[in-house]
Image (tube, grey):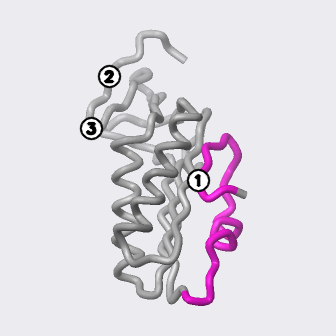
Amino acid sequence: MAKVKVTSEPFSVDEAIKLIEDPRAGGYVIFLGKVRNENKGRKVIKLIYEAYEEMALKEMEKIRKEALERFPIIDILIWHRVGELNVGEDTILIVASGPHRKEAFEACRWALDEVKKRVPVWKREVTNEGTFWIEGDKAIPDYHRV
């Protein structure tokens, strides 16, 4: 199993931890993103994630390597979902292991921010008010409804 992946399948947090398990690790920091039921006052029905998979994997691997160079951690894993995801489903999983919690927390947060900035994954939000492309804090109406 890969330490970076783009998948339409649900995540297994236990499987992810096993991939980076190491006896030197004093802790594992896990960020598990979920589809929430509301955004900016609109009721969210589902999210649709699309990715340029080949490029996304390359950029996620770069982020992973940069995190390993930047922070005194042992390992880090980055997985992202694609496809139609209902409220409550997992969207992204980042697991960082380190000898100490501080560095693992910092690496996990940094990696999440970098994924959101750099990885070619696009999000559409299907709401009670229509369908919107989400770019940062902006919601742009999608006139080609899903």
Front residue of 19/135: it is 19
Residue 95 x, y percent position in the rendering: 52, 67
Residue 67 x, y percent position in the rendering: 41, 63
Q: Examine the rendering and report whether any part of residue 105 can be seen.
A: yes
Label 1 belongs to which residue?
4
Q: Which residues are magenta?
A: 2-24
Marked residue nearer the N-terminal end (1 or 3): 1
Residue at image coords 50%, 46%: 35
Marks 1 and 3, how far apart at CA: 26 Å
Quadrant where the C terminus sits is: top right
Label 2 belongs to which residue?
140
Q: Check if residue 34 falls in the magenta segment.
A: no
Q: Circle 1 — which element?
A: strand
Dot 3 amino acid type: Asp
Residue at image coords 40%, 55%: 112
Q: Is residue 35 above or below residue 140?
A: below
Label 3 belongs to which residue?
137
